[in-house]
Image: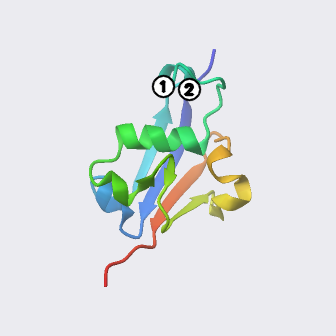
C-alpha cells in the first residue's frame, strides 16, 4: 500500500503572501490514489503537487501563482536548490524529504 510523502515547501520573493504569509511548511501528502483516484501512477509529481497546493494551501489570487496546470511565468521553482528545468519540470517524481521552493520574481514598479 502506498505511503504518505513528507516534503518541505518554501515560498519566497512575495509568493508567501498568497499562502497566509507562511514561508516554510513541512507537508505530508496522502497516497496519490487517495488524493487523485483517477491517477494512473502512485508517484507524486510536481504537477500533482501544484494541484494539491492549490486545493490545500493557496489562500488568494490563484492567478498570481498558477497558469493552467503549471506555475505562472515569473515563479522560479527549485527542487533541492536546483532549477526544476534540470529535473523535468512538471514530470519530476517527488522523493521523501525533497524541498520544493517557489520564488516570485514578479515585482510591481
Q: Of all residues shown, which one is farthest toward the bottom?
A: 109
Q: Which residue is mark 2?
A: 32
Tell me if I can see residue 107 in this picture.
yes
Left or right: where does residue 18 sit relative to residue 80?
left
Label 1 sits on a secondary structure element that is helix
Residue at the spot x=34%, y=52% of the render? 62
Rendering coords of residue 86 (x, y %): 73, 60
Left or right: where does residue 6 sit relative to residue 61?
right
Q: Quadrant of the C terminus?
A: bottom left
Q: Of all residues shown, which one is farthest toward the top?
A: 1
The Cα–Cα distance between marks 2 and 1, rounded to whole angstroms, is 5 Å
The correct choice, above or below, for 67 with respect to 107 in the image is above
Q: Are marks 2 and 1 in contact (CB under 8 Å)?
A: yes
Q: Residues within 10 Å of mark 2 (few under 14, many from 20)?
A: many
Q: Quadrant of residue 12?
A: bottom left
The correct choice, above or below, for 95 with respect to 106 in the image is above
Q: Number of callouts in the render?
A: 2
Q: Of all residues shown, which one is farthest toward the front?
A: 68
Residue 108 badge? none
The answer to which of 64 and 2 lies nearer the viewer is 64
Residue at the spot x=67%, y=46% of the render? 92
Tell me if I can see residue 22 in this picture.
no
Q: Quadrant of the N terminus?
A: top right
Rendering coords of residue 50 (x, y %): 49, 44
Rendering coords of residue 84 (x, y %): 64, 58
Rendering coords of residue 15 (x, y %): 38, 62
Label 2 sits on a secondary structure element that is helix
The answer to which of 50 and 20 lies nearer the viewer is 50
Q: Which residue is mark 1?
A: 35
Amino acid at each position: 500500500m502506498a505511503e504518505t510523502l513528507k516534503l518541505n515547501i518554501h515560498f519566497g520573493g512575495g509568493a508567501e503572501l498568497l499562502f497566509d504569509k507562511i514561508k516554510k511548511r513541512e507537508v505530508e501528502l496522502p497516497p496519490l490514489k487517495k488524493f487523485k483516484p483517477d491517477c494512473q501512477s502512485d508517484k507524486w509529481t510536481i504537477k500533482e503537487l501544484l494541484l494539491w497546493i492549490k486545493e490545500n494551501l493557496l489562500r488568494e489570487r490563484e492567478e498570481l501563482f498558477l497558469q493552467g496546470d503549471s506555475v505562472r511565468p515569473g515563479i522560479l521553482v527549485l527542487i533541492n536548490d536546483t532549477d526544476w528545468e534540470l529535473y523535468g519540470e512538471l514530470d519530476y517524481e517527488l522523493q521523501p524529504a525533497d524541498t520544493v521552493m517557489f520564488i516570485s520574481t514578479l515585482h510591481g514598479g
